[in-house]
Image (cartoon, coloured by chain):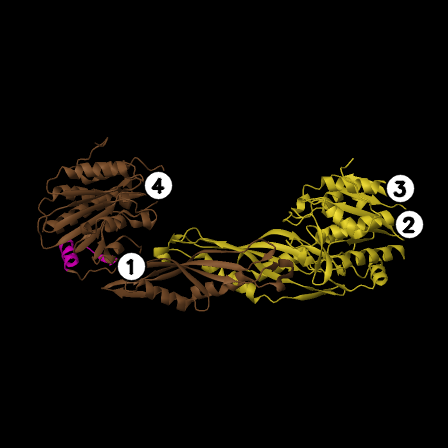
Chain colours: A brown, B yellow
Amino acid sequence: MPAQSLNLATDVVELTRAICDIESVSANEKALADVIEEALSVYPHLEVTRDGDAIVARTNLGRDRRVLIAGHIDTVPVANNLPTELREINGEEHLWGRGTVDMKAGVAVQLKLAGELVEPNSDITWIFYDHEEVDASLNGMGRLSRNLPELLKGDFAVLCEPTSAIIEGGCNGTMRIEVETFGVKAHSARAWMGQNAIHGAAEILNRLNQFQTQEVEVDGLVYKESLNAVLISGGIATNVIPDHAKVTVNYRFAPSKSVADAEAHLREVFAGLAVKVTDASAGARPGLDQPAAISFIAATGLETRPKYGWTDVARFSALGIPAINFGPGDPNKAHADDESCPVAQIYSCEEALRKWLSA
Amino acid sequence: MPAQSLNLATDVVELTRAICDIESVSANEKALADVIEEALSVYPHLEVTRDGDAIVARTNLGRDRRVLIAGHIDTVPVANNLPTELREINGEEHLWGRGTVDMKAGVAVQLKLAGELVEPNSDITWIFYDHEEVDASLNGMGRLSRNLPELLKGDFAVLCEPTSAIIEGGCNGTMRIEVETFGVKAHSARAWMGQNAIHGAAEILNRLNQFQTQEVEVDGLVYKESLNAVLISGGIATNVIPDHAKVTVNYRFAPSKSVADAEAHLREVFAGLAVKVTDASAGARPGLDQPAAISFIAATGLETRPKYGWTDVARFSALGIPAINFGPGDPNKAHADDESCPVAQIYSCEEALRKWLSA
């Protein structure tokens, strides 16, 4: 029996405050997972399963369609921004504090509707998962897909990550590579005995500067690509001609490209240089041409745009499930010390999902 | 009374071995300084002064000319290369071990001749000093010039740093600068919200690659200049557009240029970029047109060439004393794990200095 308990029938902003004030930095989600599990378990229309600190609550009404609605319950570290406060910012009421944007307001909307929607028009799988803000190998949704794959079956998914309460489709893919140059060490007093690897790295930076940002249309949304050096290092000491330099490059590529496409493109951009792929995640197509997405857009009348940041919608995409991002809060405020979410967006997300799932 | 004692009348290679085998990594010179002080103090023709672990031994014969002959007694850290061994390398007998090149073979030549030359043709100031291999602020010759400036008066100086037993005149100056670029941080998923400081650093590297190495004739010797990036760094994390990059550049400039000249030149090369001078040392003119140098070259018939690396001859130069480098061992073997000095060069340096000072 957890120390606290949640009333899911309460006002959604109050519910957001309650779950924000239960600190749940990644790896410390247990207390929050306990109260969520307890609160959902009282509803006879939900079948509740727990895996670690992830909770899955499903309706089983035999509907034609099953939608997955997911959110992570962990946050980045607290920065003197708990407990939450209601604050007026730029004339608008906000809930201020860690997690309000990323993404407990979205989780509160899920919790409220999970309790309330006893007879939704689709079967719903509500997913609350742990370890999203840390290394991908720990991700709770990844673990669920390995441990309990049957629970992640469905026709369409909504990830309640912050989108300022509009629909953001899919996400760009991301790849990191290391591009290296090599030379010959020498004492810098006799520089001509060596070969300077940092000077050689000019070629890497010049190619980055020549790269033309592409815009790629995928399923009706335009994705902007980018290619950027994010780290550079080289040199041993201030009196030694360096024999090695390394540039870490991050490529964000449209979801119409596979990881293999992206790698082939980078090997072309950096032809003749030593390239090593260190990290890659495919993007996710927006899937806005899918019936469930069409009905969601129609029911809510909301604007759609591409999502640029990589999110767990790509995990759904990899499972063959079209997925969109939709949640309260400005994504640029995620992780910020002044993280805060407009209260109106929490209500509008609640209302949009209710309307879509009840129509 | 030191635990060991030196016989300065012994063979110079044996003397080199003896002083190499008394480990004297910088800051640990006391044991060696003690035996040097004791060995020199037995000679009535020498006036011996000690300052910290530096020893100065002077003749006072009223000669027209006074020459300073100097060497440092510290070494870089030992790398399993003590005690010394006699080894045949490429068919030639070498003394192998830490300090044999940098620069105890030179110090042994000094010690042997300091004891032997009771009636030299010039007054001689023999200088043995500490802390050369570490931060310049600790340098024993620098300390002597502040504490006992009258002991560093003279007409000409020979620094017995390794030159493969030929005469290397003067030295290049050296300057280090940091050239920085600045940008605007952003999440790399939305790169166009930021400005990439590493991409901006391409300009620094391109200017370095465009730099033309100059050769500058000074007092009959040709000095080669160089301009090299020695360190580069930039970036915060692999998902952040970097707002800062820094390149540390080392400029080696001919001794005809002052530090101010060198700085003005670099500010021109990097015009429009943020430049900060972190470290500078003027070079030293070779002074081969000075009477003492002319007599040294005439007496020994040795080849002369420019010294590229900065050495303490620049300290003599700053005191208004022309100075050359002359000592046994290949400077490229200094600090190497396989540091070793051809035995023949130790004898030839001994003979050249004896001939010059006895003529």
- Marks 4/3: CA–CA distance: 76 Å
Whether callout 3 and callout 1 share a subunit is answered no
Which residue in the protein does label 1 denote?
A: A283
| Viewer-proximal residue among A275 and B222 | A275
* Dot 1 crowding, Cα within 10 Å, few <14, some 14–19, many 20+: many
Query: Who comes first in sequence, dot 4 or dot 1?
Result: 4
| Residue that label 4 marks | A77
The answer to the question of whether label 4 and label 1 lie on touching residues, with beta carbons closer than 8 A, is no
Q: Residues within 10 Å of mark 2 (few under 14, many from 20)?
A: few
Tell me if A241 is positioned left or right of A150 in this view.
right
In the image, residue B192 lies at what x, y percent?
37, 58
The residue positioned 33% from the left and 65% from the top of the image is A260
Look at 17% across and 57% down and name the residue there: A293
Q: For the residues tagged 2 and 3, is the chain the same?
A: yes
Q: Do the residues marked 4 and 2 share a common chain?
A: no
Which stretch is magenta? A291-305
Q: Rate crowding at label 4 as few (under 14), some (14 to 19) or many (20 or more) other CA atoms within 10 Å.
A: some
